[in-house]
Image: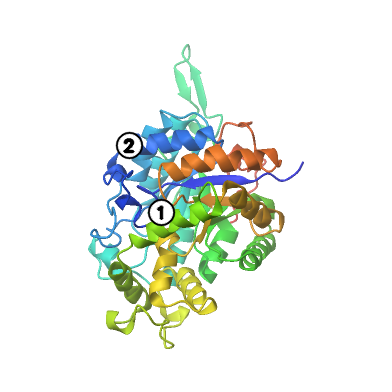
């Protein structure tokens, strides 16, 4: 059977461009509206997308003066969306740094039941003193330790999801037996970071586990993804970079004894779609004019661990930037941004314009046909299994992608014309994990 594209809609307030909220069409309070996100989810479902996705962090990110900064808690938002959709997958971010495995496993199992088997968990390790101080800490552990904790966190969560056998429910009213207690198992986990007795107080959900998603592209991030992830959201600027990342991660997965087809790699793309190429560039330029560069200048200075005055808006990046090893958070994004600026010889002002749309993800302004051409090139050349679609402006950018780009992809035989499956795992072509307690499963289907 020919490969088919996978499409995820990454939903963010009024759009991924930081100035999108300033457009006349935009509602500056859309990020606090469940109806806004329900409409977006229904639009993506109309386009037969595999899933929608919400990023999240336990800290106020960025400067509230620059763009809508508040966020609704995503798993709560997903329950509202689940009630108004029927097929599309629902992915939420949750940090392993500032959550408890038991509560988080329960929350995702609950959403999987509520949605009929459509939930996914984007696993992140949260860096930064700002987040740490919200939890009574002075700072976060170093990069490697955060990933070590994340690995144990996922281990505990999967044990909890396995703690009920699929056939534990009996429901014998005459005998008065609801469930078989021999098929409900203690977790009894004792590790470096967690002690969890179990079992979970939610039976095994329709998918068994949520689809496990990961978005880090550092060495630690890629090793973690190769071991655990079933979908990977990544940022690559060129086809060659995409092919290198794709091949590397698939090979790491193979070396760990996993089938590389069970990990789907979806680079981000920020499309600005116009009636003509000129029209698309005009729309993109309008957004660029609305950027307030001083906000981004301060953001870049913080990322590069430099004083603000070291970044001259009309000069290239300084030569003496820190190395990736000196950066504790978002290592791969740091390197991507520096390489983009060096490769294209951008001034700080030009770099800010490039980052304003996608924070390092590939931005593209063109017609629907040109967007489809780009997607097809990456997909057929082995640079992607699909795309994390990040519209610059919402809802119009997603509506235009669904109405204009998706039909082209369908006509070319690259994408589905209707849903053929019901759960998120099925959409992505992923197996339902067998329980580690089942007789034929061995230890577990997740490589731990």
Label 2 packing within 10 angstroms: few (<14), some (14-19), many (20+): some
Return the residue found at the far right.
1
Frontmost of labels 1 and 2 is 1
Question: From what the image shows, is residue 289 above or below residue 430?
Answer: below
Viewer-closest of 181 and 413? 413
Q: Secondary structure at mark 1?
A: loop
* 117, 70: nearer the viewer: 70
Label 1 sits on residue: 16
Say above or below: 78 vs 266: above
Of all residues, the one furthest to the top in this rendering is 174
Residue behind mark 2: 34
At x 38%, y 41%, the residue is 107
Which quarter of the image is occupied by the N terminus?
A: top right
Left or right? Give the position of 323 relative to 299.
right
For the residue labelled by badge 2, is the local secondary structure a helix, a strand or a loop?
Answer: helix
- Mark 1: give few (<14), some (14-19) or many (20+) Cα within 10 Å: many
Query: Residue 241 location, x and y as percent?
Result: 61, 68
| Residue 433 pos. (x, y %) | 60, 42
């Amino acid at each position: 059977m020919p490969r088919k594209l996978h499409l995820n809609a990454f939903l963010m307030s009024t759009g991924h461009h930081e100035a999108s909220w300033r457009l006349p069409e935009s509602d500056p309070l859309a990020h606090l509206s469940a109806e806004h996100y329900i409409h977006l989810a229904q639009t993506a479902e109309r386009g037969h997308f595999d899933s929608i996705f919400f990023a999240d962090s336990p800290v106020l990110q960025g400067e509230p003066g620059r763009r809508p900064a508040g966020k609704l808690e995503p798993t709560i938002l997903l329950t509202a969306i689940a009630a108004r959709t029927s097929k599309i997958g629902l992915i939420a971010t949750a940090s392993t740094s500032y959550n408890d495995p038991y509560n988080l496993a329960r929350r995702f199992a609950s959403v999987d039941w509520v949605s009929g088997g459509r939930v996914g968990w984007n696993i992140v390790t949260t860096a930064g003193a700002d987040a740490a101080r919200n939890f009574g800490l002075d700072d976060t552990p170093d990069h490697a330790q955060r990933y070590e904790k994340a690995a144990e966190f996922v281990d505990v969560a999967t044990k909890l999801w396995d703690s009920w056998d699929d056939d534990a429910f009996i429901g014998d009213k005459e005998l008065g037996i609801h469930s078989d207690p021999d098929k409900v198992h203690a977790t009894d986990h004792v590790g470096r970071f967690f002690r969890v007795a179990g079992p979970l107080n939610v039976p095994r959900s329709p998918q068994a586990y949520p689809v496990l998603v990961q978005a880090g592209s550092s060495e630690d991030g890629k090793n973690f993804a190769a071991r655990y992830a079933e979908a990977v959201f990544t940022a690559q600027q060129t086809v060659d970079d995409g092919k290198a990342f794709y091949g590397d991660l698939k090979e790491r997965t193979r070396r760990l004894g996993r089938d590389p087809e069970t990990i789907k790699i979806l680079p981000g793309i920020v499309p600005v779609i116009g009636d003509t190429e000129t029209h698309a560039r005009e729309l993109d330029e309008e957004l660029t004019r609305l950027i307030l560069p001083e906000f981004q200048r301060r953001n870049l200075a913080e990322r590069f661990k430099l004083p603000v005055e070291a970044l001259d808006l009309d000069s290239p990046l300084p030569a003496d930037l820190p190395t990736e090893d000196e950066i504790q958070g978002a290592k791969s994004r740091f390197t991507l941004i520096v390489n983009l600026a060096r490769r294209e010889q951008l001034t700080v002002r030009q770099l800010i314009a490039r980052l304003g749309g996608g924070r390092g993800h590939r931005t593209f302004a063109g017609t629907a046909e040109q967007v489809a051409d780009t997607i097809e090139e990456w997909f057929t050349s082995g640079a992607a299994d699909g795309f994390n679609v990040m519209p610059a402006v919402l809802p119009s950018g997603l509506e235009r992608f669904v109405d204009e780009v998706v039909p082209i992809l369908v006509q070319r035989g690259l994408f589905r014309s209707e849903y053929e499956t019901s759960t998120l795992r099925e959409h992505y072509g992923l197996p339902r994990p067998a329980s580690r307690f089942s007789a034929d499963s061995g230890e577990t289907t997740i490589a731990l």
